[in-house]
């Protein structure tokens, strides 16, 4: 690699530099007077905004030159990475709003700086994940994301559930990353490389699957699967989601999953794309990697959705439902086609909006009625009309019904599945959508069809609350009518990525 | 044609109208009611204008509008109507104002939301009947579920929550199967397309097994909506719990979307599969006719009685559709309209009585003909139309269906029509017996002595229906000629496809 190429690659890392810079600024602010420390959220927000703008600018130049900026072998900055970094930064920006609103977190005034430092480390980890192109790099990025997450989950340290969440998360996480590291070393043992592309290049030289490789692959998929809570690596999810503060739960179920999906998709696509390895039967096992993904997808969506039905805690319900959504994304990945990748990117964009929306409503309700139990939502539809209408939009979109964007997201997954002739998977996807309708509508049912026992008025929403809800909700309706921009964006970025 | 914008205008008026309702003040109930009524009447007038400009001799689609929507997938905003859709569009725009008018007293709280949902529902129903793009059709089909869910769930009776969820889950399951079938079908040509006119050419060329699967997926979704026995169990619950206006719309228009879908999609898209499936669906239809009538007979709740009679009446429609002759399809189409009118009116009458007495148990009534003579006369009139008395609308539809399916070459067995004809007799039994128990005999219940007869507003909701009932009964050609070209064209194209 020549020097100019190297330098231009380094230039594309400007958003990451900005994040590191602001991370340090926050550290210093935390050390100084209380008055300065109070400004941390504002500074955190502006840092993210700058990084977001820088990222957009990078994408702009990328569009102009149309060249693939595969600057390093360890990290790649291509259209796919930029799209995901855009999602990560935008969602982190909204996350700061969540933190400001989350009174549970705000109760720890003196630890505010600490909280944002953790958050910034997570953002950095996620951005690195989005462009990781090497197993070691992916592993490190994953740890940069995970370690602060463990602490953040237990941020309310006097709260038993929060501490439990943190410990569980840590234990599961440690095992998962250990297993993944073991998988990486096994792969290195048989391939003498840790690059994502190694499988393709070795296979093209006629080396077939051997048992060690299969084991390694399963371990690595398990490591990634843990991060995006893919069944059967999902056991940490519900308890952690219930125990952690609402804002952290939101973060873990939305932002951190975007990054997890990014690296997982890149790993699968780079390892197998352009080859028929996905469909090549593994000797002695009677199935191929594709059917392995299909199996994981079916398990993930079915377990996630079925369990969600029985949840009364809305955070837990959304947690399980997010497992179900991951199942849809893995399904699109199993389609192993361009259409499938477009479906993944569009799905994630919409997933971010609607999940953020739903979680924000949960958070706002929690600090008004003091409960996260769905059964306590009785009659909210009339007590808080605006909030409830927005919740309906988010829930209808999560359920995947027209005329919301959630429908289109699911539609493109279905299209990809039908094109790839994965009919069984499509049937499971239908089955799961119906289950989803059932439990999402249960929330609406309680809010609108059941009468509240108390008549006391609730604290009203601030203008800021309403604006953020509209920012999240209106696109779901507008894109629900005209979805093409999302798909075009996904297609463009993938084209530049050369997938 | 110059007035090409008319269908979009209908949609814009109903969606825009519902949004307008949202802007009005919540406290002013009568303003909301009047605005809703006026909007729905304007929509009705516009649809009459469409009728006026409609050319009945042309079997193709008219007032066609097309605009690209999703380029990559060949999906477009594509609407147009032919004779069958025109009749159903007219039915929708005709029933909606009446349903709105009927609720002036019964819906007291949340008038704003109610009117909003009713107009939104109208937009969804109109969209379903006008879409010529499978995808657009699907969107309207699904979008209409949400207003109905709320109408049953918020303004319904005691068991409304159970009923609304059951309604939703049933329909949703069917529609998702249809969605997958739509994607499959759209994908089976050279390019992904959901344009119905393109698919009409593509569908019949598919192999038999593909046609069978696709047919089954589509028909499942439609059969749930109709509902065809044994998928009907959501219907009695939904009807009993829904508020009067909800029942009227449900019986009057919503159920027709299922039968409409069968005629619009199943028959022309998959002619070979239609031939395979027709006898089975005809059997289910006949079972539905007999079963629905027998179950109606033993109902204690009059709303349930009317609900089960819908299962029987729509059995006739399904039999007519799969009789696959010009007469039987003509009969099925006019019977969709008839059922909408008669059953809609029956639900209105049941609702008015319920508003006064708060009971729907038949045994608590008796002899009310003396107390409320106008009411009893109208009830008799509507019941007779529902039974199919010659001179009223029901007769025309049932007669055409029976004649058509008797000599149907596809069903090839007169037994279907013969057994179905029993249904006509059974309808007389359960409706007249009901009438006897309610209106004749002596007044046993003292509470009934304070019963008041229909007021002017209520008469205004019923008289237009009665006029149309007589009109269809005496001079059906006004309506039959609208769908004639369509039906004969459909049958000949299926025959041609089968002959190949």
Image (spheres, rainbow, N blue to C red):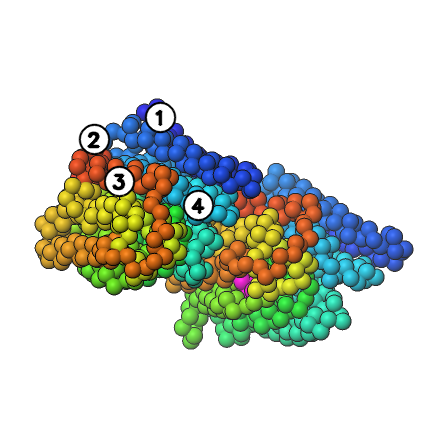
Residue A221: image x %, image y %?
56, 68
Disc 4 + disc 3, Cβ < 8 Å: no
Please determine if labels 4 and 1 lie on a single subunit. yes
Near-viewer residue (A480 or B101): B101
Residue B114: image x %, image y %?
47, 46
- CA separation, marks 4 and 3? 22 Å
Instruction: Identify the residue under disc 1.
Output: B3
Name the chain letter of the residue that bears numbered label 3. B
Name the chain letter of the residue that bears numbered label 1. B
Residue at x 53% of width, y 45% of height:
A477
Please determine if labels 2 and 1 lie on a single subunit. yes
Disc 2 + disc 1, Cβ < 8 Å: no
Q: Range of the magenta residues? A: A317-322
Whether residue B237 is visible: yes
Whether residue B280 is visible: no
- CA separation, marks 2 and 1? 18 Å
Q: Crowding at label 3, few (<14), some or many (≥20) Cα neighbours within 10 Å?
A: many
- CA separation, marks 1 and 3? 31 Å
Instruction: Identify the residue under disc 2.
Output: B57
């Amino acid at each position: 690699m020549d020097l100019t190429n190297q330098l231009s690659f380094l230039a594309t890392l400007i958003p990451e530099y900005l994040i590191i810079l602001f991370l340090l600024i926050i550290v210093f602010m935390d050390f100084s007077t209380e008055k300065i420390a109070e400004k941390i959220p504002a500074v955190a927000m502006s840092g993210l905004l700058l990084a977001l703008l820088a990222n957009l600018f990078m994408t702009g130049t990328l569009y102009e030159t149309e060249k693939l900026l595969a600057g390093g072998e360890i990290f790649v900055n291509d259209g796919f990475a930029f799209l995901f970094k855009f999602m990560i930064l935008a969602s982190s920006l909204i996350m700061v709003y969540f933190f400001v609103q989350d009174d549970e977190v705000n109760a720890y005034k003196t630890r505010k700086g600490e909280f944002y430092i953790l958050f910034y480390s997570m953002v950095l980890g996620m951005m690195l994940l989005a462009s990781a192109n090497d197993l070691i790099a992916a592993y490190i990025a994953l740890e940069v994301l995970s370690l602060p997450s463990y602490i953040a989950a237990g941020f309310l340290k006097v709260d038993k559930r929060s501490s439990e969440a943190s410990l569980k998360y840590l234990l599961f996480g440690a095992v998962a990353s250990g297993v993944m590291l073991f998988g990486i070393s096994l792969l290195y043992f048989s391939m003498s490389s840790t690059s994502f592309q190694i499988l393709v290049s070795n296979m093209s030289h006629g080396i077939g699957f051997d048992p060690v490789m299969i084991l390694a692959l399963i371990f690595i998929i398990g490591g990634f699967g843990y991060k995006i809570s893919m069944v059967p690596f999902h056991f940490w999810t519900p308890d952690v989601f219930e125990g952690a503060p609402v804002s952290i739960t939101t973060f873990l179920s939305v932002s951190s999953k975007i990054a997890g999906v990014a690296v997982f998709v890149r790993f699968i696509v780079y390892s197998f794309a352009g080859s028929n390895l996905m469909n090549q039967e593994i000797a002695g096992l009677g199935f191929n990697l594709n059917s392995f993904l299909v199996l994981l997808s079916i398990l993930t969506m079915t377990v996630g959705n079925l369990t969600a039905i029985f949840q009364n805690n809305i955070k837990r319900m959304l947690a399980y439902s997010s497992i179900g959504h991951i199942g849809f994304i893995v399904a699109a990945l199993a389609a192993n086609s361009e259409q499938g990748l477009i479906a993944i990117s569009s799905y994630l964009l919409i997933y971010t909006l609607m999940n953020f929306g739903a979680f924000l409503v949960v958070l706002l309700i929690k600090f008004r009625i003091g409960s996260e139990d769905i059964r306590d939502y009785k009659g909210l539809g009339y007590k808080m009309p605006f909030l409830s209408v927005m919740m309906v939009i988010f829930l209808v979109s999560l359920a995947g019904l027209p005329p919301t964007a959630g429908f289109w997201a699911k539609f493109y997954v279905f299209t990809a599945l039908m094109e790839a002739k994965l009919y069984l998977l499509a049937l499971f996807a239908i089955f799961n959508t119906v289950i989803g309708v059932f439990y999402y509508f249960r929330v609406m049912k309680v809010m609108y069809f059941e009468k509240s026992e108390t008549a006391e008025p609730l604290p009203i929403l601030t203008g800021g609350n309403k604006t953020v809800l509209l920012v999240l909700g209106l696109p779901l309706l507008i894109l629900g009518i005209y979805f093409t921009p999302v798909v075009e964006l996904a297609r463009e970025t993938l084209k530049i990525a050369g997938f | 044609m110059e007035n090409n914008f008319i269908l979009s205008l209908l949609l814009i008026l109903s969606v825009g109208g519902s949004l307008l309702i949202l802007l009005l003040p919540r406290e002013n109930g009568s303003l909301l009611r009047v605005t809703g009524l006026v909007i729905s009447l304007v929509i009705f007038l516009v649809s009459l204008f469409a009728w006026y400009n409609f050319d009945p001799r042309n079997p193709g689609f008219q007032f066609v509008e097309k605009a690209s929507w999703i380029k990559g997938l060949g999906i477009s905003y594509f609407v147009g109507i032919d004779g069958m859709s025109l009749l159903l569009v007219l039915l929708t725009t005709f029933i909606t104002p009446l349903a709105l008018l009927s609720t002036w007293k019964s819906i007291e709280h949340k008038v704003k939301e109610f009117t909003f949902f009713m107009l939104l529902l109208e937009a969804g129903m109109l969209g379903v009947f006008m879409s010529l793009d499978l995808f657009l059709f699907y969107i309207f089909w699904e979008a209409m579920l949400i207003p109905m869910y709320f109408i049953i769930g918020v303004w319904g009776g005691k068991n409304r929550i159970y009923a609304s969820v059951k309604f939703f889950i049933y329909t949703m399951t069917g529609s998702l199967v249809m969605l997958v079938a739509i994607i499959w079908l759209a994908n089976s040509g050279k390019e992904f397309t959901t344009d119905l006119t393109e698919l009409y050419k593509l569908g019949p060329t598919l192999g038999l097994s593909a046609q069978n699967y696709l047919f089954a997926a589509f028909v499942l979704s439609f059969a749930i909506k109709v509902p065809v026995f044994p998928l009907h169990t959501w219907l009695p619950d939904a009807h009993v719990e829904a508020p009067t206006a909800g029942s009227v719309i449900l019986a009057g228009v919503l159920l027709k979307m299922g039968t409409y879908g069968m005629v619009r999609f199943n028959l022309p898209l998959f002619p070979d599969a239609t031939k395979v499936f027709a006898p089975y669906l005809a059997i289910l239809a006949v079972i539905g006719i007999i079963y629905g009538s027998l179950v109606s007979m033993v109902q204690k709740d009059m709303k349930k009685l009317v609900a089960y009679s819908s299962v029987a009446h729509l059995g006739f429609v399904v039999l007519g559709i799969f009789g696959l002759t010009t007469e039987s399809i003509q009969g099925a189409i006019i019977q969709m309209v008839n059922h909408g009118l008669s059953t809609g009116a029956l639900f209105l009458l049941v609702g008015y009585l319920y508003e006064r007495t708060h009971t729907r148990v038949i045994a608590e009534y008796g002899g009310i003909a003396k107390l409320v003579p106008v009411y009893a006369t109208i009830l008799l009139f509507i019941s007779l139309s529902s039974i199919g008395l010659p001179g009223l609308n029901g007769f025309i539809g049932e007669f055409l269906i029976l004649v058509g399916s008797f000599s149907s070459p596809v069903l090839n067995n007169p037994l279907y029509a013969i057994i179905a004809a029993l249904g006509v007799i059974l309808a007389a039994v359960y409706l007249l017996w009901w009438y006897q128990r309610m209106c004749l005999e002596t007044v046993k219940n003292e509470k009934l002595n304070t019963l008041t007869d229909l007021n002017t507003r209520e008469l205004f909701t019923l008289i237009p229906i009665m006029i149309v009932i007589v009109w269809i009964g005496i001079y059906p050609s006004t309506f039959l000629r609208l769908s004639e070209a369509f039906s004969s064209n459909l049958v000949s194209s299926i025959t041609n496809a089968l002959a190949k």
